[in-house]
């Protein structure tokens, strides 16, 4: 590949290139930068000033320091699978890509923890320790590609977070480069719950606005002794929702409890990993229970019983690991599968109390009709985390705006029943205005004040997470 | 902020017969990039992204760039060409992509545009002209080249070259190639020139035609011989149409779709009177199955190509599907299997060759992690991008288990590259084609000499 020196007079590019060791670790030409103009959220696009590829924490710190001193906006990027635009360089940022920092630094089975660099891909952690009987629990559907650094920033969740919790429940320590270039360690030695403020909790889910994570100590778990997976087809969404409620009210905590509606089923069946789901059902449930062997069979029996009581059309238990893997591949590639039935999609990420499921799904249906856009639903039903996928065609004039408005209305519906506007995908650019559905101006200012302590010049990932001041400033004055 | 705002100016409005800045014949198919939802699920499957970590060298990035040219945001220039030609065309992203985006197909179409927009210059033009147009499509010239190689090996020149370190004068990647050149024997196309049908042993169950391949038949005629023996042993009459030619894959990969089409037409005609075309080179098989893609704008040939492509089958899948005799002799060897990209990702053939190998008595299959990861051969990629090919090969070799004797696969291009890997990384495996192993077992059973 090319490697012909730096061809620009821009002193910043030259200085950054020197920090990372030359032309193979920096991109600055339009043709290359274009690949970084958005992440998994494609509605907004901006070119970065440059993309740099540091090899270690010291290089990250030096880049950040340089940007800080020269007032250059900058942000971190992992695999760019984020769905809310967190890694989009709105202000022509210098993108610090962490993907070359992808080492598994150490595994400590005795204390059940592992230390990784931020660019280490989520699934690789489980793959590296599974032969010794361990795994890393947070399993976002993007786990084949997304980085653990990105997971920390977004506090990523996944199908199995119903029982095991989201990323924040599995982070024991972080090394962070602060926006002025200073390197700090938080939660040193992985001692749980140290005295003082819970900085780990604050940093996890801060969407890359408080610092750049350069090393992560995570909790790893012992593989469950046994696992069983159930697939249930329902003629009516209401019955499927009711079955979800019944399972939880019966006191069971399945490892995963996922739902897909008819449009979603149409997409996954048209895409790369079809299972053969019937196309005329309104909803399917994918349920997994795990734990010690004793008791699994009873739980499965109870779940089958509940499904039948709720008029299930067909329900089956995975007969072997291949079948189980096929069901999960079908579910986990669900978002991308939308490409098979629609040119573009916008995925929303609302959370609602479980009991409101049928009601909110009904409203989403109405929103879909109102805008004349199809909306597919794939979601973590167990914890009420909805993912309405608004299908649209950006090439058609006005359709992107319609999709955004429809998405926003879905979130409003969630907020209105006492829910939230994001379960796991973050706020980013996408939902910053919707933050007003759940926070008033004072609450927003209280939070931006915290950001300013870490990020006083607001050079790091500016314009994300909180609505643009405007109204807030007025409140401040008043 | 306005939506879809971009820092890049909008390009010219499309004129009929063009698509943004794609101005040449045989335009890329916009439906292919329309399927991409930019989810990034393909990133980790891509060997060039693995090596560089740079998204313009990832499937998602490439699709985005190719689409941007159609939107008029980018022009076809050197900086655009780089990521497009650095793609190995390994199709791993096609397997990974939930939306079934045909990245490989798009890359080939866009390379077609690039080669019309900016013809090659310098030594790359020379290599491309000499091999792609001057040699591969012409069996006699290829055979002549083969004879030259044979002479080179037989005359002692090869030994001399190695001894006197003459090969150190060659560019490193050519010297590497030289070191692993197989023994050249007589091409089967020449050998069976006057034989209409090579008869099945025993009762004839099917009649099949064999694609002998161009380089394949010169460098690896022993694999073609093995294929013929395995086919006839299993009740197949084998015909070798003499007017068949190179499949055109290398041309299409390089963006020379026009020559690709000419070769395709010749092959479609050469095989028109047979019902089955058996291929033992994954790259060629994949190309033959994709002939219809070359004729998207030519309904008459498109239909012929469709009909033709349905007749094509890889040798391993053919044997597996039609049934083959399990050999009785024991081979007593530990092997591992490498998925050729154009077999696994290109044709979806993964289990059949493994099943055949495991069915041979005394063959112990050892699992290779990431078996379907590209080896870096990718046609002439290892000549045009030696540095990347070397890095990809290194990752591949790290996955080859230590304690095996043989590495089996279904593509001659991979065999050369893997043999180079064995040599360069100080390993001691031998590289074999899946049918060769089956053939050895049959031969041993028949009491013929063992392979050693
Ligand atoms: C098909 C698909 C399915 C998905 N499924 C799920 C799911 O089930 N659950 C879920 O939670 N999410 C899901 N996501 C969203 C996404 O994968 C997650 O948010 C993931 O954590 C992002 O990781 P990344 O490496 O791609 O980060 P990026 O997209 O590169 O970055 C995301 C944010 O993190 C910041 N960041 C990245 N690295 C660092 C770092 N080292 N230090 C500080 N900040 C950093 C960036 O600035 C940005 O704001 C899905 C996405 C896709 C495309
Ligand atoms: S090519 Fe497929 S996997 Fe890759 S970004 Fe596009 S839709 Fe996703
Ligand atoms: S064909 Fe191979 S090298 Fe090319 S983009 Fe796809 S995965 Fe990468």
Image (spheres, rainbow, N blue to C red):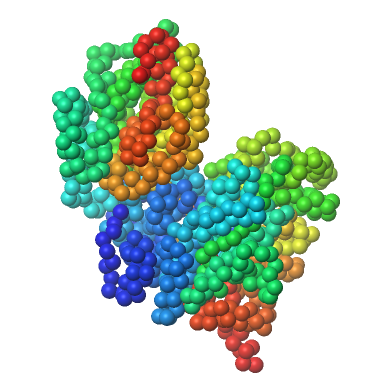
The reply to whether residue B446 is visible in this rendering is yes
Q: Is residue B310 above or below residue A25?
A: above
Residue at the limit of the structure toward the top, as seen here: B202
Image quadrant occupied by the N terminus of chain A: bottom left
Residue B120, x across and y down, in percent: 21, 50
Q: Is residue B84 above or below residue A192?
A: above
Q: Residue at coordinates 41% horizontally, 13% vertically from top-left?
A: B444
Residue B417, x across and y down, in percent: 33, 37
Say whether residue B144 is left or right of residue A424.
left
Q: Is residue B330 above or below residue B304?
A: above
Q: Residue at coordinates 24% horizontally, 50% vertically from top-left?
A: B116
Count the marks: how many? 0
Return the residue nearer the eye: A341 or B225.
Answer: B225
Residue A229 image-quadrant placement: top right
Q: Is residue B298 above or below residue B210?
A: below
Q: Residue at coordinates 67% horizontally, 72% vertically from top-left?
A: A198
Say whether residue B19 is left or right of residue A133.
left
Residue B233, x across and y down, in percent: 41, 13
The reply to whether residue B414 is visible in this rendering is no
Return the residue nearer the eye: B162 or B231.
Answer: B162
Return the residue nearer the eye: B131 or A26.
Answer: A26
Return the residue nearer the eye: A456 or A109.
Answer: A109
Residue B312, x across and y down, in percent: 40, 27
Q: Residue at coordinates 59% horizontally, 76% vertically from top-left?
A: A466
Image quadrant occupied by the C terminus of chain A: bottom right
């Amino acid at each position: 590949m090319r490697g012909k020196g730096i061809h620009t007079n821009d002193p910043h590019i030259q200085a950054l290139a020197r920090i990372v060791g030359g032309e193979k670790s920096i991109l600055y030409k339009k043709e290359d930068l274009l690949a970084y103009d958005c992440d998994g959220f494609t509605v907004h696009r901006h070119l970065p000033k440059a993309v740099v590829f540091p090899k270690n924490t010291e290089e990250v710190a030096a880049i950040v320091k340089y940007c800080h001193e020269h007032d250059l906006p900058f942000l971190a990027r992992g695999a760019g699978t984020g769905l809310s635009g967190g890694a989009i360089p709105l202000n022509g940022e210098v993108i610090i890509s962490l993907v070359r920092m992808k080492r598994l630094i150490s595994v400590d089975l005795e204390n059940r923890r592992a230390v990784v660099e931020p660019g280490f891909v989520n699934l690789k952690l489980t793959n590296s320790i599974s032969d010794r009987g361990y795994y890393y629990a947070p399993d976002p559907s993007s786990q084949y590609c997304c980085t653990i650094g990105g997971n920390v920033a977004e506090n990523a969740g996944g199908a199995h977070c119903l029982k095991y919790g989201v990323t924040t429940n599995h982070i024991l320590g972080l090394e962070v480069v602060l926006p002025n270039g200073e390197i700090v360690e938080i939660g040193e030695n992985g001692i749980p719950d140290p005295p003082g403020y819970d900085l780990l909790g604050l940093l996890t889910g801060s969407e890359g606005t408080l610092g750049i994570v350069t090393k992560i100590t995570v909790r790893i778990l012992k593989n469950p002794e046994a696992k069983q997976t159930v697939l249930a087809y329902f003629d009516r969404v209401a019955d499927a929702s009711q079955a979800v409620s019944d399972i939880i009210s019966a006191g069971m905590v399945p490892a995963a409890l996922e739902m897909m509606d008819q449009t979603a089923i149409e997409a996954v069946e048209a895409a790369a990993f079809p299972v053969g789901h019937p196309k005329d059902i309104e909803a399917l449930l994918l349920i997994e229970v795990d734990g010690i062997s004793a008791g699994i069979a009873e739980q499965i029996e109870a779940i089958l019983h509940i499904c039948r009581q709720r008029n299930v059309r067909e329900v089956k238990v995975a007969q072997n690991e291949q079948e189980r893997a096929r069901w999960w591949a079908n579910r986990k590639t669900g978002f991308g599968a939308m490409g098979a039935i629609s040119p573009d999609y916008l995925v929303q990420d609302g959370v609602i109390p479980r009991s409101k499921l049928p009601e909110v799904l009904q409203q989403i249906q109405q929103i879909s009709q109102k805008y004349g856009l199809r909306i597919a639903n794939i979601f973590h039903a167990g914890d009420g985390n909805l993912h309405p996928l608004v299908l649209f065609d950006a090439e058609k004039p006005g359709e992107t705006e319609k999709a955004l408005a429809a998405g926003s209305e879905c979130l409003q519906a969630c907020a209105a029943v006492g829910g939230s506007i994001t379960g796991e995908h973050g706020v980013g650019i996408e939902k910053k205005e919707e933050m007003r559905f759940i926070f008033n101006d004072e609450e927003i200012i209280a939070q931006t004040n915290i950001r300013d302590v870490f990020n006083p010049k607001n050079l790091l990932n500016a314009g994300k997470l909180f609505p643009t001041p405007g109204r807030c400033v007025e409140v401040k004055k008043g | 902020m306005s939506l879809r705002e971009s820092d890049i100016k909008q390009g010219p409005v499309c004129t009929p017969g063009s698509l943004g800045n794609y101005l040449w014949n045989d335009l890329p198919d916009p439906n292919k990039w329309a399927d991409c939802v930019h989810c990034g699920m393909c990133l980790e499957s891509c060997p060039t992204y693995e090596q560089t970590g740079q998204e313009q060298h990832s499937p998602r990035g490439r699709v985005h760039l190719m689409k941007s040219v159609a939107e008029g945001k980018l022009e076809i220039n050197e900086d655009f060409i780089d990521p497009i030609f650095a793609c190995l065309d390994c199709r791993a992203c096609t397997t990974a992509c939930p939306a079934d985006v045909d990245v490989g197909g798009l890359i080939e179409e866009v390379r077609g545009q690039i080669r019309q927009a900016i013809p090659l210059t310098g030594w790359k033009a020379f290599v491309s002209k000499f091999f792609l147009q001057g040699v591969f499509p012409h069996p006699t010239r290829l055979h002549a080249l083969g004879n030259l190689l044979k002479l080179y090996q037989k005359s002692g020149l090869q030994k001399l070259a190695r001894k006197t370190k003459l090969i150190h004068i060659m560019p490193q990647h050519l010297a590497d190639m030289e070191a692993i050149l197989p023994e050249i024997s007589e091409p089967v196309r020449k050998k069976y020139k006057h034989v209409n049908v090579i008869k099945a042993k025993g009762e004839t169950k099917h009649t099949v035609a064999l694609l002998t391949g161009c380089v394949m038949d010169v460098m690896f005629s022993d694999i073609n011989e093995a294929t013929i023996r395995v086919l006839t042993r299993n009740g197949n009459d084998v015909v070798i149409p003499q007017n068949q030619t190179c499949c055109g894959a290398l041309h299409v990969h390089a963006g020379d779709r026009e020559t690709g089409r000419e070769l395709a037409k010749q092959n479609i005609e050469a095989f028109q009177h047979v019902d089955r075309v058996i291929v033992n080179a994954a790259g060629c098989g994949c190309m033959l199955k994709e002939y219809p893609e070359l004729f998207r704008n030519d309904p008459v040939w498109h239909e012929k190509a469709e009909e033709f492509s349905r007749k094509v089958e890889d040798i391993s899948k053919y044997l597996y599907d039609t049934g083959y005799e399990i050999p009785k002799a024991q081979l007593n060897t530990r092997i591992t299997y490498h998925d050729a990209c154009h077999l696994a990702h290109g044709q979806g053939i993964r289990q059949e060759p493994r099943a055949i190998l495991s069915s041979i008595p005394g063959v112990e299959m050892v699992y290779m992690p990431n078996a379907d990861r590209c080896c870096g051969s990718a046609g002439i990629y290892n000549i045009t991008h030696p540095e990347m090919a070397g890095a990809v090969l290194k990752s591949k070799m790290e996955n080859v288990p230590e304690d095996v004797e043989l590495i089996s696969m279904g593509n001659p291009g991979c065999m050369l590259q893997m043999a180079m890997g064995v040599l360069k990384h100080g390993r001691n495996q031998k590289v074999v084609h899946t049918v060769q192993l089956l053939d050895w077992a049959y031969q041993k059973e028949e009491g013929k000499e063992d392979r050693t």
